[in-house]
Image (cartoon, coloured by chain):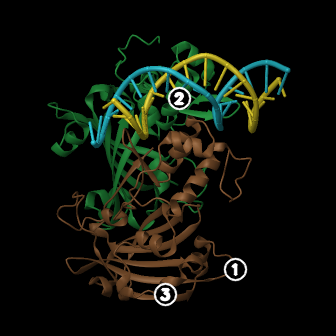
Chain colours: A brown, B green, C yellow, D cyan
DNA sequence: CAGTGGTCTAGACCACTCC
DNA sequence: GAGTGGTCTAGACCACTGC
């Protein structure tokens, strides 16, 4: 089996090795987002594996959210990086179920390099370096702030964000991470709890101090499984609404 | 391919047909919970399909939460019906991460047949029959009530629960549903929000009226995909804690 | 119609568990 | 070593899409 120069671990199953190699090519941007990959038979030939093995490798990429299969048409690089993600969990608009609802506008209030608190550094596994990028945003609907986001990133792939004009940050950060820093978010872990707003935070949201708030802590992971973003989002508890499917 | 008498839809893929047939045998209790199924090769022979097809059918059962595979040992019927499920989402004990933590005790306050509110009837898809079983429970840790559960069930498979002594209900309902009514819960959909406690509910939880509460609405589905239980759980918002993995 | 992904087969060999 | 699930192959045919 021919593999890329990036040492494939020979102890791993072949479909894992092929999955890794294929993932790297996708992330490297060999195909445009939304574009079709070569047919499975062709890919199997390229990697020198049987069709079934190739299909298993592709299945892993689909699970990871990198690819999308369409019967009879082809296999495509996922474009949208889907989401308003977090945003769908609050019922801020009357048409809450509307999939075409526009992405809420983001306003950046702060962006700088900081010393990380130990708990944040631990979540980002920054090791000895306790420094990172800090971002404070509000999200607005109809020009009214409804969410407050504190975001921490490791310096390593993200330092260049410090040199980007705030106006050039999009409303959605994940596509922006991909464009600017080559980081693809494939998985996230969220932790939901409940608290009250500190005075300063309440001010940014136009709410009273000590108002009840939903608090979401999210750690987002890259293709390689490394934690690359930690964020704490706060919003009006009474408008919070989260759906989960179990098993 | 030999199938059970229950008409397999010939238009479905073979592995789906085998999955359906196998699921029925598991639910019917042909193997004890925790017991090993025959080897894959033997099952493939029984159903007259290739090993790969049999493995795909088994994989579906694993996804559905019915089976568990252990490399080198065998394929087993899932016993525990896992969980304290809901309960792990509140941080009521100091050792919150302890997997051995005992299941909180349940106390039944009400159990009767009722006329269903339209929204509950809609969730349970009871059709013209708007009647169901209603259950009101509190869950206790160290003899202190910490959760309040309102549970609605369709009459069809559950009516016999009305004749069961309250003391014979276990702390976990899902294994009880299986034993008493042959209903296996395989999937649930939860909806999390925040609210405040009504006076009567607050009283049952030993909290002040209007206290902030986490509210979880859960619809649970049987093996066949029908909604068979709707419950609303309330608990102290300050002790609420929910973890979700996305994608 | 050609080209794609989806299903299925019959066999081989590997990795793990338990005796 | 015997028995299990996990990986892999090389081929066949089916189902869907689009020209």
The residue wearing badge 2 is B58
State the residue at coordinates (43%, 62%).
Answer: B240
The residue wearing badge 1 is A128
- The answer for which chain carries disc 2 is B
State the residue at coordinates (25%, 64%).
Answer: A91
- Can you give x and y, in whole percent of width and height, for residue B169 in the image? 43, 35
The residues bearing labels 3 and 2 have C-alpha atoms spaced at a distance of: 51 Å
- Can you give x and y, in whole percent of width and height, for residue B176 in the image? 44, 32
Q: Is residue B31 left or right of residue B156?
A: right
- Can you give x and y, in whole percent of width and height, for residue B29 in the image? 50, 21
- The answer for which chain carries disc 3 is A
Which circle marks residue A162 in the picture?
3
Q: Is residue D19 above or below residue B194?
A: above
Dot 3 crowding, Cα within 10 Å, few <14, some 14–19, many 20+:
some
Q: Is residue B203 above or below residue D15?
A: below
Comparing B135 with A236, the one in front is A236
Callout 1: SS: loop
């Amino acid at each position: 089996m021919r593999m890329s120069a990036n040492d494939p671990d020979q102890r791993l199953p072949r479909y894992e090795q092929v999955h890794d190699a294929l993932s790297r090519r996708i992330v490297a941007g060999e195909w445009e987002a939304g574009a079709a990959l070569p047919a499975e038979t062709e890919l199997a030939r390229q990697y020198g594996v049987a069709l079934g093995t190739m299909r298993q490798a592709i299945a892993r990429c689909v699970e990871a959210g990198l690819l999308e299969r369409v019967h009879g048409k082809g296999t495509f690089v996922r474009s949208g990086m889907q989401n308003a993600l977090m945003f769908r969990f609050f019922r801020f608009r009357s048409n809450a179920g509307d999939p075409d609802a526009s992405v809420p506008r983001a306003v950046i209030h702060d962006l700088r390099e900081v010393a990380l608190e130990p708990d944040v550094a631990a979540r980002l596994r920054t090791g000895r370096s306790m420094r990172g990028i800090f971002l404070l945003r509000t999200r607005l609907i109809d020009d009214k702030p409804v969410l407050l986001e504190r975001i921490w990133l490791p310096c390593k792939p993200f330092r260049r964000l410090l040199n980007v004009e705030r106006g050039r940050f999009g409303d959605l950060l994940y596509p922006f991470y991909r464009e600017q820093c080559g980081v693809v978010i494939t998985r996230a872990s969220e932790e939901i709890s409940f608290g009250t707003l500190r005075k300063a935070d309440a001010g940014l949201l136009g709410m009273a101090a000590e108002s009840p708030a939903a608090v979401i802590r999210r750690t987002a992971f890259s293709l390689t499984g490394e934690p690359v973003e930690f964020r704490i989002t706060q919003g009006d508890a009474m408008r919070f609404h989260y759906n989960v499917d179990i098993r």
